[in-house]
Image: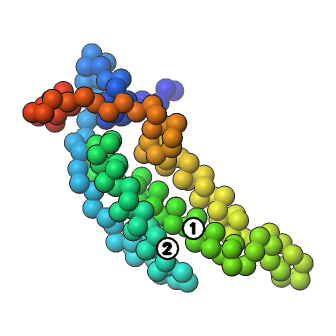
Amino acid sequence: MAVVKPINQHIREGTFRPDRHSSRLALPPAELSEPDWSTVIGDGPGAGKVKADASEIWQRIVPALSAATQITDAQREVVVTFCSAQSRVWEAERIISRDGLLVVGANGVLVKNPATTVVNTYASILRAARVELGLSPSTAARIAVPQTDEDDDTDGVWD
């Protein structure tokens, strides 16, 4: 089964064709509101720093995403996932830096630090989210910013 791109992605990439894509759902761009990171990340050891990191990532990427990709509120959860995953990677990296790549296991033998597994798991999530959001260099290179007149917005899609 072929994967169908959302119409907004066709518009961003410059591949929109009214004869092929006009019957698809088009979502209007929206100002994204930052989530309450306590409900996303929760509480626990190190959670304060993870929340602060997630908020910092949000503040840094959302303005750029909004301007470049006309992201919608319906796509907000991908951004939340990206910010949360990146902040978790940073936390796991801090743990690895503090404790080392190898730690003493339950039987007294050196074992791989469990935080390395966390890094690998969240790295996979980040790769997928980067592609979805156009944040990887290769994906960003394929995105064409739609040309608009000063008084027109993306070919009247939002009129």
Find the residue positioned furthest to the front: 150
Give the residue at x 32% y 42%: 68
Give the residue at x 58% y 72%: 91
Q: Amino acid at mark 2?
A: Val
With 86 as the anchor, is 38 left or right in this view? Answer: left
Is residue 124 visible in the rendered image? The answer is: yes
Q: Amino acid at mark 1?
A: Trp
Residue tagged 1 = 90
Q: Is residue 39 above or below residue 147?
A: below
- Secondary structure at numbered mark 1: helix
In the picture, the disc for residue 50 is 2
Asked whether disc 2 touches disc 1, contact meaning CB atoms under 8 Å apart, the reply is: yes
Is residue 10 visible in the rendered image? The answer is: no
Spot occupied by residue 59 in the image (x, y as percentages of width and height): 35, 63
Q: Is residue 151 above or below residue 62?
A: above
Find the residue positioned furthest to the top: 19
